[in-house]
Image (cartoon, helix red, strand yellow):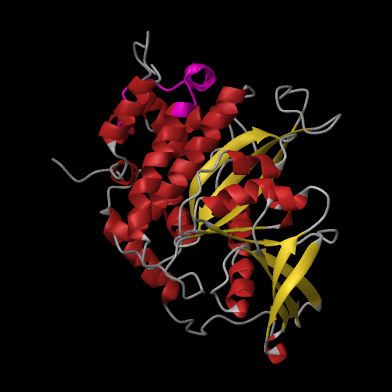
């Protein structure tokens, strides 16, 4: 008697199978493969992310304990850690990078009306990187310092929905500013970056493409004032100026004008100087846009805490990138089903519920809705408090 699909199978239904098949064919992912397909690899690695498995042995033990349910999970082959390790080692990581890019295209229209704290019709991106430390003796391909290894996640985050629209994985030695060469500027969009990305030649390419940027000035940035606008100093603003880069080479690298906004944050007693190529926004909005850059820092903190990206199931470059891209795909998948099923809870709540119910046969919408409503119930006060 049919009693419904497993929760895990319901979650993976939101993956576009035809797009994944094209990704596999594009890179020959199943050439000479007889049993353990890329679909099996993806589902095993997605299971590891959703159930918080820490090693290949964990994945093997858990899935073999549920041997009778593997077919209903969409896994057609026997799961062993050696087979999964070989797949992570040899199957091209770009299969899963392309899958993540396809999931971004699905997720973004779902979050297009989300508010991120600033009333602005333009698309706003936050750009930053995060470092994941590695043991250099185990990961010799990822040097960071003389005796340390690391990989960097360079991420462009769409602030509407906190969706990673661009991710580049590099070794720890690659400078942050070099990622600007890999981005294709989107006309009319805002790119919010910290001062590590202040490179006038690269930013001028964004300016010529019709894109806008907001970044911080360095202490030694040489600028010549051309015009000053009045500001309300009670709001924290100190100046709003039109400036030109000066110095030996900078005027040639950025031959246009910039806008300099100086803002004093009373809560931290810090004075910040912002540079942008947009001259029509209110000066306070420029400061608010830079404040939103902190969302990309929260994104890095969130995925490091709730996805398996700090300890790896393999030591090769391909295995590490495969695991990272599948983790990003799982994040996007949960974000998609949250919108499609209209779940009001947070991604954290959804992941916690899924981690305990993957082998249950409950309708996914009912499961997540009930869990969110249960966490929203008011505290009854029947339990004694140990601390007041």
Q: Residue at x 59, y 57 (%)?
A: 296
Q: Is residue 300 left or right of residue 43?
A: right
> Residue 315 sits in which quadrant?
top right
Q: Nearer the viewer, residue 62 or 247?
A: 247
State the extent of the magenta-drawn residues as a range.
Answer: 74-94
Say whether residue 72 is visible. Answer: no
> Residue 154 sits in which quadrant?
top right
Q: Is residue 347 left or right of residue 214?
A: left
- Residue 67's spot in the image, x, y percent? 36, 28
Q: Is residue 382 left or right of residue 1?
A: right
Which corner quadrant holds the N terminus?
top left
- Residue 329's spot in the image, x, y percent? 44, 42
Q: Nearer the viewer, residue 199 or 380?
A: 199
Q: Does the segment drawn in magenta span residue 88?
A: yes
Picture layout, residue 142 above or below residue 240: above
Q: Residue at x 66, y 64 (%)?
A: 258
Q: Residue at x 74, y 79 (%)?
A: 265
């Amino acid at each position: 008697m049919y009693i419904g699909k497993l929760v895990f199978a319901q979650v993976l239904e939101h993956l576009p199978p035809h797009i994944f098949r094209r990704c596999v064919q594009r890179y020959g992912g199943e050439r000479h493969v007889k049993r353990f397909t890329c679909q099996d690899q993806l589902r095993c690695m997605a299971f590891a992310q959703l159930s918080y498995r820490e090693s290949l042995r964990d994945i093997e033990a858990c899935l073999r304990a549920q041997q009778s349910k593997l077919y209903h999970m969409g896994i057609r082959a026997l799961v062993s850690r050696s087979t999964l390790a070989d797949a992570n080692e040899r199957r091209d990581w770009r299969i899963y990078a392309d899958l993540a890019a396809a999931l971004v295209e699905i997720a973004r229209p779902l979050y297009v009306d989300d508010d991120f704290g600033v009333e602005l019709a333009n698309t706003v991106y936050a750009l930053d990187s995060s470092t994941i430390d590695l043991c250099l003796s185990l990961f010799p391909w990822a040097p960071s310092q003389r005796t340390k290894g690391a990989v960097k996640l360079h991420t462009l985050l769409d602030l509407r929905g906190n969706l990673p629209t661009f991710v580049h994985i590099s070794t720890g030695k690659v400078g942050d500013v070099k990622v600007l060469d890999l981005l294709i500027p989107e006309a009319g969009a805002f790119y919010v970056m910290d001062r590590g990305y202040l490179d006038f030649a690269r930013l001028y390419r964004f300016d010529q493409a019709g894109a806008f940027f907001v970044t911080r000035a360095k202490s030694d940035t040489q600028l010549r004032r051309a015009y000053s606008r009045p500001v309300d100093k009670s709001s924290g603003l100190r100046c709003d100026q039109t400036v030109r880069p000066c110095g030996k080479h900078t005027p040639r690298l950025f031959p246009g004008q910039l806008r300099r906004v100086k803002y004093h944050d009373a809560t931290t007693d810090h004075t910040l100087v912002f540079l942008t190529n947009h001259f029509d926004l209110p000066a306070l909005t420029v400061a608010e846009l830079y404040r939103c850059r902190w969302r990309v820092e929260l994104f890095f903190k969130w995925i490091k805490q709730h996805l398996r990206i700090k300890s790896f199931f393999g030591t090769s470059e391909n295995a590490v990138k495969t695991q990272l891209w599948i983790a990003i795909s799982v994040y996007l998948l949960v974000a998609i089903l949250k919108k499609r099923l209209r779940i009001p809870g947070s991604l954290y709540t959804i992941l916690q519920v899924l981690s305990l119910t993957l082998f249950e046969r409950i309708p996914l919408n009912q499961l997540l809705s009930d869990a969110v409503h249960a966490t929203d119930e008011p505290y009854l006060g029947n339990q004694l408090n140990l601390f007041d």
